[in-house]
Amino acid sequence: MRIKKIIKYSALSLVSVFGLLLIFLSALYLTADMKQPVIDTNTLPAYSLVKTDSLRTYGPNHLRRSKSGLWEMSLQGNPAERGVAFGRLAEDLLHYQEEVFVDQIRQIIPSDSYLKFLRFFLILFNRNLGEYIPEEYRTEIYGISLSCSHEYDAIGTPYERQLNYHAAHDIGHAMQDYMLVGCSSFGVWGNESANSTLLIGRNFDFYVGDDFACNKLVSFYQPANGYRFASVGWAGMTGVLSGMNETGLTVTINAAKSTMPVSAAMPISLLAREILQYASTIDEAYAIVRKHKTFVAESLLIGSAKDGKAAIIEKSTDKIALFHSDTDRIICTNHYQSDTFKEDPRNKENIATSDSPYRYARLNELLNENIPVNASKAAAMLRNRFGKGGKEIVLTNEKAIHQFIAHHSVIFEPAKRLMWVSTAP
C-alpha cells in the first residue's frame, strides 16, 4: 500500500512539473519578439521593376547575370529602400535559395510535425534575436522578406525565416563536431607578397548541397550611412561572409570550436557586415566586435589597406583577442592562436582532435613554395587538393585546402580594391 502511494504521489509530482514546464515554455513562445520593423511602403520611391534577358532594374538598383555565371547586384539608399529593392530584383532567386535550403532540411527531418516542433524550438531559442541585431539590418531583412514566398510559413513568417537564416552559419559551426563548416584563409604582405602589398585568399567551406551554391551573388552596396562595400553570398544574405569595402578593409569569417549556443545573440555574418560598413582599420574593426555578444566562437580575418597587413580577431562567447603575426604572413583555419586562448580547453581540444592544425601546416608549406605570392599563385593554393608534402589524399578529404565543399573562394588585393571571385564548378 505504501509503495502504491509513493508511485501515485511521484506520478502526480511529475505531471505537475511537466505541466509547469509546459506553461513556462508556452509563455516564452507567446512572448517571443523578433522585433519585426514596420515599413511604410508609401514613403518609399515608386519604382517599376524592369526585366530584360540580361538585366533587371529597380530605380537606381540593378541585378545582372555576368558572363562568368555570377549574379551581380547593386543596391543603394536607406535600409528599407535597399531591402525592398533586393527583394523585388531577386524574388525568383530568393524562392529558389529557400527551396533548396528547406529541401536539405527535409532530407534530415522528413516529418511535417517535427518541422513544426523545429519552428517552436527556433522561436524559443531565437525569441530575443531581434534585440541583438541593429535596427538597420532588421529593417533591410524585413524589406527583403516582403518578396519572400509564404510556402514555408510552417517554419516561420518570411521575416522570421530570413532573420533565422542569417544565423545558419553559426548553427552550422556550433555543430563543428559534425564538420558542417571548416574554412581556410591566409594573408601575405611585405616580402611575401609579389608587389609588397597585402594579398588575401580564402575558401568559404559551407556546404548544404550543390544546388545551394548554384547562384552565387556578388552584392555591391552603397548604403546611406557608412562605407560602400562588396560581398559574396547568396540571395537573401545581407550579412557578410567574404567582403571588402571602399577603404580597402576586408573581412572573412572562419569557424572556431564552440559550445552549443543556449540563447540568441548577434549572428557572425551580421557582425562582419557591420565591420565592413563602418570600419576602415583593424583597430576600428576590433572596437566593433568588442561591442557585441555572439552566438558562437569565430575567427575574423581582417585585412586593411590602411594598415598594410592583416590580423585575426578571435572571439568566443565570453572572451576576445586580437592576434597579430610577427612575420609578413598570417594563416587562419579553425583554431585560435593568441595567448588569450592558448590554455582554453575548447581550443586545446580543437587543436588535438580536428583537421585545423593540419590545414594550417599545409598552408604554411604552400606559402613557402610560392613566395612571393601573387593572385594566380593564391588561386592555385586555394585549389590545392593534396596533403602535406604534396601527398595524394582522397578527394573531399577534410585535411585538404580544397575539400570540394566551398560555397565560394575569394582573393583580395586591398590596396588596388581588386577582388577575384570563384565561379562554377
Image (cartoon, rainbow, N blue to C red):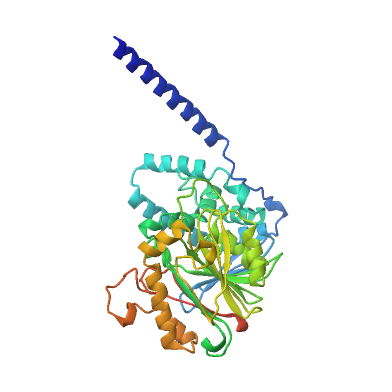
Q: Quadrant of residue 368?
A: bottom left
Residue at 41% across, 82% down: 366
Judge from the rendering whether residue 175 lies leftward or rightward of residue 59; answer left or right.
Answer: left
Tell how many labels: 0
Residue at 60% across, 63% down: 273
- Where does residue 280 sit, x and y in percent of width and height? 67, 72
Judge from the rendering whether residue 308 lies leftward or rightward of residue 11; answer left or right.
Answer: right
- Where does residue 279 sit, x and y in percent of width and height? 66, 68
Q: Is residue 358 above or below residue 111?
A: below
Judge from the rendering whether residue 214 lies leftward or rightward of residue 301; answer left or right.
Answer: left
Q: Is residue 339 above or below residue 118?
A: below
Residue at 34% across, 68% down: 398
**Picture quarter with the N terminus:** top left
- Where does residue 116 sit, x and y in percent of width and height? 42, 40
Between 341 and 248, the residue placed more toward the observer is 341
Q: Quadrant of residue 219?
A: bottom right
Q: Which residue occupies the extreme top position in the image?
A: 1
Specify whether residue 238 is in view.
Answer: no
Q: Quadrant of residue 181?
A: bottom left
- Where does residue 378 sit, x and y in percent of width and height? 46, 82
Between 141 and 416, the residue placed more toward the observer is 416
Specify whether residue 119 is in view.
Answer: yes
Residue at 37% across, 55% down: 104
Q: Is residue 20 above or below residue 348?
A: above
**Picture quarter with the C terminus:** bottom left
Judge from the rendering whether residue 90 lies leftward or rightward of residue 407; answer left or right.
Answer: right
